[in-house]
Image (cartoon, coloured by chain):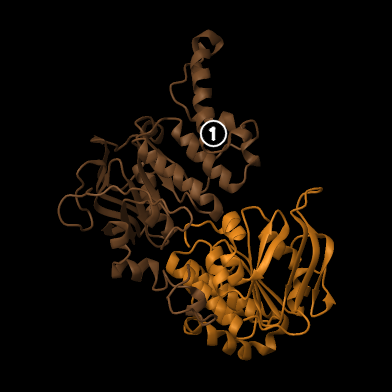
Chain colours: A orange, B brown
Amino acid sequence: MAKSTETPVVVAKDLVAGYLPGVNILNGTNLYANKGELVGIIGPNGAGKSTFLKAIFGLVQVRGGSITLNGDDITGLKANKLVSRGVGFVPQNNNVFPSLTIEENLQMGMFQDSKRFDERLEFVTGIFAELGKRLKQRAGSLSGGERQMVAMSRALMMDPAVLLLDEPSAGLSPARQDEAFIRVSEINKAGVTTIMVEQNARRCLQICDRGYVLDQGKDAYTGTGRELLNDPKVIGLYLGTLGA
Amino acid sequence: MSSNGTSDSPVKSTGLHVGEIKPGVAKKDPILIADGVRRQFGGLTAVDVAHVEIPRHAITALIGPNGAGKTTFFNLLTGFDTPNEGTWSFNGKSLAGVPAFRVARMGLIRTFQLTKALGLLTVMDNMKLGSTQQKGEKLWASVFPFLWKKKDEEIEVQALDLLTRFKLDAKKDDYAASLSGGQRKLLEMARALMTKPELVMLDEPMAGVNPALTQSLLDHILNLKKEGMTVLFVEHDMHMVRHIADWVIVMAEGKVVAEGDPHEVMKNPAVIDAYLGSHQDVDLGAVTGRITLPKMGKEK
């Protein structure tokens, strides 16, 4: 059910990036996300999934290729510039300010555009109703799943054109994982284009419109979530047969 | 759940318990018994296990939500941490006050959730380090190679054999730091087996391992049972638990809240409520209304 439109929101073309000199983690990765799409990225350990998100968000130096946002080139821009242009990023760990309250965490997410706070708070608490009731609570006292919600909410405060999520289910128990995936789906349904990297591949593909399988820094397979879930090659290489 | 393709479901051990199934139920032949084990960190009681027995020659899974005290319980049982009170015994011998290395020599070995491979040693050296009773370790003996050379060769053969089983033999001369996360998990498990333990305790063996590797990891664990070892493991992957565990112990808030056969335990409403969630066997695409499933219920 890809809600495709004319121009994709994000296009990454032949992306090359890495941390150490001479060692590339991404070796020409391609990806696009249409408006309103939920795109999942899965792949084996060390395939470059997180690096890919970091490269889009300017946290890793891009050595080759290009990234465009709504047609504008954003390759090599710093993270703060990207946020003001409408890219939201939720890191895997350490993604809240533990000594600040939930409300302050959310304010931190939009200090570049603080006038719209009330309006955006309404949107965010529409999705995460329980956070709205606990705005004065310190983020450090929250459980892992709740922190994940705060981190997602903070990224949503800037009304991003695209939301990048790095393993939203990592470290959560099965029930909390399912809850996290359902929330991601709700965010996406509220109109936010979302790109999600996940280790829990089966769950990720179940809710995705389209998915990419990354292998050794390249997009090895792509298709709708359902196609990938049932693709024997993807199952053999990555999904395994156990949870089928 | 079904395991299509490789449809050879492992043979489960049954009849492990005595009497009615309830938390703390007695086992016919327990290898490990913990009684009244409690560990507090300041005001927080991390572990408060009234009584639990681990059945011998079986695969037992320890599951529970984050912060239930599973890893702390592991640490207490293996001498990596000391409880505030309680007794625990392995093969009938009390382990109170026994340091971790001696626990390992007694035949109870563990692995860690975050692997502890020695990165700047080769894979082979990591394996050799796992072996016990190395005569060459002694200062004086070390200068007389004839005393330990034969033993060293035996150890190398054993290590190579294990590495071959875990498909790491091609990497034996590489530094452990160059291995991927999944391969390190395998190395850690192989190294643990160098001591020929009786009870192997695995802390989240599947965490961070790509799903395609899990099948071979599972086969290794099942093989341990075939060879007469006992396995206790912590895991969040319920497919794995259902597939290989003979017995499941559920912890929540430091206590054992349920025990039993995997399929029975996972139907327990308290377990579903506290841990599994209500969507366990459902396609989330359907839950979120992204797809409409055909009438069969769930996809294959």
Outermost residue on the left side: it is B19
Instruction: Name the residue: 49% across, 52% down.
Output: B206
In the rendered image of this protein, does residue B291 appear above or below residue B190? below
Please state the chain letter of the residue tagged with numbered disc 1 in the rendered image: B
Specify whether residue B254 is in view: no
**Rendering coords of residue B180 (x, y %):** 62, 46
Residue drawn at x 52%, y 68% is A203
- Nearer to us in this view, A5 or A71: A5
Examine the image and state in which quarter residue A110 appears: bottom right
Q: Looking at the picture, does residue A141 appear above or below residue A240? A: below
When asked about the image quadrant of residue A57, the answer is bottom right
In the image, A167 versus A94, the foreground residue is A167
Secondary structure beneath label 1: helix
Q: Residue at x 44, y 64 (%)?
A: A173
User: Residue B21 at x, y = what percent?
Assistant: 20, 57
Q: Amino acid at mark 1?
A: Leu
Mark 1 — residue? Answer: B163
- Give percent across and percent down for residue A6: 77, 84
- Left or right: residue B201 versus residue A85 is left
